[in-house]
Amino acid sequence: MARIAIIVGHARRDTFCETLAGAYKRGAEAGGHTADLFVLSRMSFDPILHEGFSKEQKLEPDLQAAQDAIGRADHLVLVFPLWMGTLPAILKGFIERVFQPGFAMDRAESDTGYTPRLKGKSARIIMTMGMPALVYRWWYGGHALKMLKRNILHFVGIAPVRTSVFGMVATVSDAMRKHWIDKVEAMGRAAR
């Protein structure tokens, strides 16, 4: 059975992203997996990495709990909306604070880069948006997904990274929302 860390990267509370994360957690637990849920809008932390990677910035208790859960996890789930073409700032800040050298990566011996430390973990990205998912993927090239997958998750060793994109979330029918919730719950049962 898998250990899973679920992160809801939305700045507001009680959103469809939170509903999807809850469905994933229910499915995971029904499948015999262990799932820790972190809703960033309900956590207390400074999302700004003030000194970059040049100086250690002590993690607040909420961030330390999330980092510990990610460290134990076999699988990471990130649920967030597309905002202004990319991740919400709170999620980007969370990633910058939690995925620090010494946890997510080590400085390479040659000091020319970093060595990933999170190998052996997989991830699922669940992104919601106001536009049709097909338009985002094909016309806009899914650039936020590519950035998160390649430049962050793969960079620290997390692979494979699977993606699910749900578009037109504000205007779809209740039946479609229920279909998506059921689909995400099934992903949780399978820990995928």
Image (cartoon, rainbow, N blue to C red):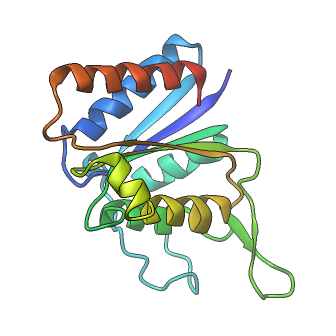
> Disc count in the image?
0
Q: In this view, does 126 lie above or below 183?
A: below
- Image coordinates for residue 143, horizontal then vertical, percent: 45, 66
Q: Locate residue 1 relative to residue 32 in the image: left or right.
A: right
Q: In this view, does 128 lie above or below 148?
A: above
Placement of 35 over or under 122, stated as above or below:
above
Specify the quadrant of the image occupied by residue 139: bottom left
Q: In which quarter of the image is residue 174?
A: top left
Q: Which residue is drawn at 42% across and 61% down?
A: 94
Quadrant that contains the C terminus? top right
117 relative to 180, above or below = below
Quadrant location of the N terminus in the rendered image = top right
Q: Which residue is drawn at 22% across and 43% down?
A: 168
- Residue situated in front as seen by the camera: 88 or 143: 143
Judging depth in this view, the residue of 129 and 81 nearest the camera is: 129
Query: What x and y, as percent, mark residue 29?
Result: 50, 17
Q: Is residue 25 left or right of residue 104?
A: left
Q: Is residue 59 visible?
A: no
Q: Is residue 183 left or right of residue 44?
A: right
Residue 11 visible at all: yes
Q: Quadrant of residue 91?
A: bottom left
Residue lying at the far left in this picture: please name it: 171
From the top left corner, tell me how far across and down residue 27 is, in percent. 46, 18
Q: Which residue is drawn at 57% across and 81% down?
A: 53
Q: Which residue is drawn at 42% across and 19% down?
A: 26
